[in-house]
Image (cartoon, grey):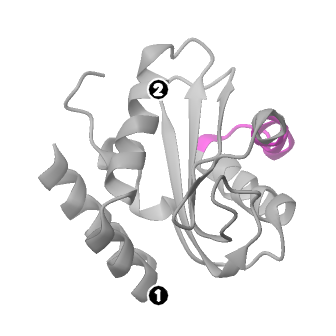
Amino acid sequence: MDGRMTLTDLLSPAAVISPLRANGKKQALQELALHAATLTGLPEREIFEALLQRERLGSTGIGDGIAIPHGRMPGIDRLVGLFARAEKPIDFDALDGQPVDIIFVLIAPEGAGADHLKALARVARVLRNQSVLEQVRKIRDPSAIYAVLAESAAQAA
């Protein structure tokens, strides 16, 4: 992976969840771990534990209603992303105190090193684009959300 990596390298149409139904941070992470398990073949419990462990270090809520939970996992050979739009905003202990409705999960191989950080930066850059945010907040259909993200990823590349 290099500087040309885009969101669509991390995200497949099957990895867009809308709406995500969860009443809190832990439930949201459980739902996302379940989806991630089906995409990666990794055990759901281990994914959930990795995400939860990262949240214990500090919230991955980066502000603007966005959270980017992430974790490193053995047994995976590429970065995998999941995008979710919450049905109703979730308290995520975000840095700005705002509830979160846009969640992008990133699962990285254990030895991903800088690629993991580059991917996080790329995700944050796309999601902080106000027009992208407005569009994905309005759209209910997962494939339409994927199309918006893919288009913005192509423009950002």
Q: Dot 2: what SS?
A: helix
Find residue 105 and report its horizontal and vertical position in percent.
Answer: 59, 49
Q: Amino acid at mark 1?
A: Arg
User: Magenta residues: mostly which secondary structure?
Assistant: helix
Quarter residue 32 falls in:
bottom right
CA distance separating discs 2 and 1: 29 Å
Residue drawn at (67%, 78%) of the image: 89
Q: Residues within 10 Å of mark 1 (few under 14, many from 20)?
A: some
Q: Which mark is residue 32?
A: none
Find residue 143 and report its horizontal and vertical position in percent.
Answer: 37, 75
Examine the structure image and report whether residue 148 is included in the region drawn in magenta.
no
Which segment is the magenta one? 40-52
Quarter residue 35 falls in:
bottom right
Sooner in the amino-acid sequence: mark 2 or mark 1? 2
Examine the structure image and report whether residue 46 is included in the region drawn in magenta.
yes
Find residue 139 and report its horizontal and vertical position in percent.
Answer: 40, 86
User: Where the N terminus falls, by quadrant?
Assistant: top left
Residue drawn at (37%, 58%) of the image: 128
Q: Amino acid at mark 2?
A: Leu
Total marks shown come to 2
* Residue 22 shows in this picture: yes
Q: Which one is closest to the eye, mark 2 or mark 1?
A: 2
Residue 153 is left or right of residue 77, and the answer is: left
* 45 to 99, vertically: above or below: above
Residue drawn at (56%, 58%) of the image: 63
| Residue that label 1 marks | 140
| Residue that label 2 marks | 117
